[in-house]
Image: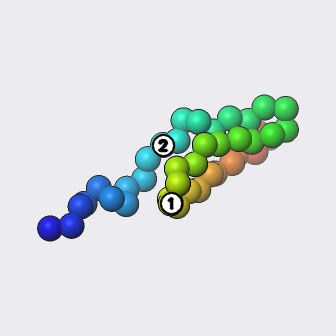
Amino acid sequence: MEDSTSVLPAQNVSVKAKGGWLTAELPAVSWSRIRLALDS
């Protein structure tokens, strides 16, 4: 049986935006997506 949790979305709480810079710690050998929202 395959591991059913090997590819599940998970929140990355290390993402920070400060002073016009965005930083994040990304796990090795992973797929990552960072979504940004614009304030209006």
Determine the residue positioned at 74% across, 42% down: 22
Q: Quadrant of residue 39?
A: top right
Q: How is the image coloured?
A: rainbow
Image side of residue 23 versus residue 8, left or right = right
Distance (Cα) linking label 1 and label 2: 16 Å
Please name whichever residue, 6 or 8, is drawn nearer the observer in this view of the structure.
Answer: 6
Q: Which residue is mark 2?
A: 11
Residue 18 in the image: state x and y as whole percent. Answer: 78, 32
Image quarter (top left, top right, bottom left or bottom right) of the C terminus: top right
Q: Amino acid at mark 1?
A: Val
> In the displayed image of the protein, which residue is found farthest to the bottom?
1
Q: Residue at x 37, y 56 (%)?
A: 8
Residue positioned 85% across, 32% down in the render: 19
Q: Which mark is residue 10?
A: none
Residue 24 image-quadrant placement: top right
- Identified by mark 2, the residue type is Gln
Query: Crowding at label 2, few (<14), some or many (≥20) Cα neighbours within 10 Å?
Result: few
Residue tagged by mark 1?
29
Q: Residue at x 70, y 46 (%)?
A: 37
Disc 2 secondary structure class: loop
